[in-house]
Each structure stands twice: as C-alpha cells, then as structure tokens.
Image (spheres, rainbow, N blue to C red):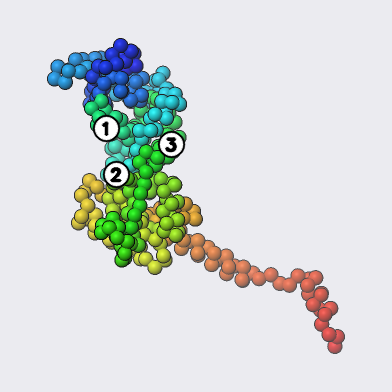
Amino acid sequence: MNVKDIMENNQDQNIIVRTEEDELWRGKLKDIPEMYQGMEVKETAWSMANKQYVLMVPEIEREQSKSDFHINKEQYQNLLDQLRIELIPTEYNRELLEKAAHVEMEDLSMIVYAMAPQGDGSTKRILVTDAALDAMGIDREQFLHDAIRASEKNYPAKMQPLSSFLFGYDEGPAAQIYVASTQDMTNGAAVIMYPEFMDRAAKELRGNFFILPSSIHEVLLLRDDNFIELEQLKETVHFVNKTEVPMEDVLSNNVYHFDASERKLEIGDKYQDRISHEKENRQSLLEELSANKPTMHPSARAAKKKDEPAR
C-alpha cells in the first residue's frame, strides 16, 4: 500500500508523513505533494496529541533499485514549480552532500530544495536527494539542469546599485557596485547559477565582472575594469566574513569572476592564471613566427630580379 492508495477515501484527513528519523510533510492528505504520493506506507498510527494520522514510510537507500512509481510529465512539472536552488560551501557540508542531489562549482555546491506548501499555509523546505530522484525514476543530470531553470523562474534574481540598496540613491563609489540576490533576499547567492541573470548582469556591467560572496543570501558584483586588484578584493571579503557575517551565513572567502565572452564563472585566481597563460602562449607563437620568418618565394625572387635594371 502506498500513500496514493490511502488518499482515495481520506482526502480531508490530517496526516504526517515521516520516516523513523525525519518528518517529511504534514497537512491534509488531499494537499500532499506528488513527490510523496507513490511512497510505500509500512505502518500508520493515530496521533492523539495532534489528532492526525502518522504515515510511516521507509528510508530510501541509494543502493535500492528504483521503485515502480515513476512520475509523469505533469507531476514532474509540478515538482519543478516548487524547486529552489541554494549555494553552500562544499568543504563544510560533506555529510549533507553525500545524500543531496548537487553539482559542484569551484569550492561551492548547488543543492536543490522542494518548497512544499503545507496544509496550515506554511512552506516546508525538503532537500532533494539522489535517493529520491532514483525512487522517482528521474535522471540526476537532467534534473539539476532543469532545477536551475525552474529556480530562476520561481525565485527571480534582482540587482541594484549598492548605494541604492543602502541609502536610496545612485551616487558615489557605491553606485559602481551592485547587490544581487533573489526577490526575497533569502539564499540569494545562488543567482550566480542563473544563466539568464548572469548574461543580464554582464550587459548591465558592460562586460566581465567580479563576484564578491558577501553571504549565502547575496553577492556583490563589480565591473572588471582591469585596474582592480584581486588581492585587495579577497582581503575585503575575508575581513567582512570574519567580522560581520554570522558563521552559518558565510559562503566563501574566494572572489569569483565571470568572463562575459566565454560565459565562464570561476574563481578569480583561476581566471587570472588562465588569461596569463593565454597571453604567454600568444607571445610564444608570435616569437616563433618571427624567428622562422619565411624567405621570399622563388617566383617572387625571379620577378624582382627581372624588374631590376641591367648593369
């Protein structure tokens, strides 16, 4: 018996869906997210305190074979409509990343949450795991690609001059720095994973730009005008993280760079190393061409000799 079987005659029943370790969802059975409807129910119990049924579902092991419940296109779209991506520092979240569906970007990792509406009107953040994707028959790589696009639609990015954000006017040095986040300013650093937003930011900043991770909730964007010292930016980020940002909100001490022409996001140090290496290669090629300058073609020499006056 699975959750969907129970729903047939108990649409208005209040329930809690949980494993032995975690509560997954609570509310009226008719409102349960589709991602849980195919789960097997191993036992039910009546909660006297909450006056609702508790549906116990098993933990899904990653090694477990895929269940018979594979969501259809409509259910998959409904799932996408609930998704939100977040960026977290990889190094301090190894345990979480062992089970979370994620993609790494430099020293950061993008994870995905389903923002499931609850029966009481609240929203529950549900981490999307590799095991859950396996159970629903969803390709992991395709899902992560779709999740970025879905999050960009569900939680749009915004950017505004820092001076406007802090003081309400666009003047002074702070007007050259932009704050980027989601509309609700929550876990908004993930907007740097939004492809359309990054293209829009490059257009607004007229080319390449640096990204300063001020916290997991927002980032600062600063145009790369070839005069800014990367080391100075890194020192600023490190100082702010150490003195002003709560430890749980720190994203990274690195500064990132977006190459507008390449559409490439990378750590600033890697960008500078890459550009330096490319310049060295071009210089070596020019020197090689100069050293091996071809001699005049025989036919050209003959024509030149023909044109010379006879002695």
Question: Mark 2 falls on what kind of element?
Answer: loop
Give amino acid for label 1: Thr
Q: In this view, does 127 lie above or below 12?
A: below
Question: Mark 1 falls on what kind of element?
Answer: strand
Tell which of 210 and 90 is nearer to you.
Answer: 210
Q: How crowded is mark 1: few (under 14 residues within 10 Å), some or many (20 or more)?
A: few
Residue 18 in sight: no
Mark 2 or mark 3, which is nearer the start of the sequence?
A: 3
Determine the image quadrant of residue 47.
top left
Give amino acid for label 3: Asp
| Residue holding disc 1 | 123
Q: Where is residue 124 in the image (x, y as percent from the top left)?
A: 26, 32
- Image quadrant holding the C terminus, namely bottom right
Residue 193 in sight: yes
| Residue holding disc 2 | 184
On residue 290, the disc is: none
Mark 1 or mark 3, which is nearer the start of the sequence?
A: 1
Give amino acid for label 2: Asp
Q: Residues within 10 Å of mark 3 (few under 14, many from 20)?
A: some
For the residues labelled 2 and 1, the Cα–Cα distance comes to 14 Å
Residue plotted at (43% across, 55% down): 202
248 lies left or right of 155: left
Q: Position of residue 68 (x, y in %)?
A: 41, 18
On residue 146, the disc is: 3
Residue plotted at (37% across, 38% down): 154
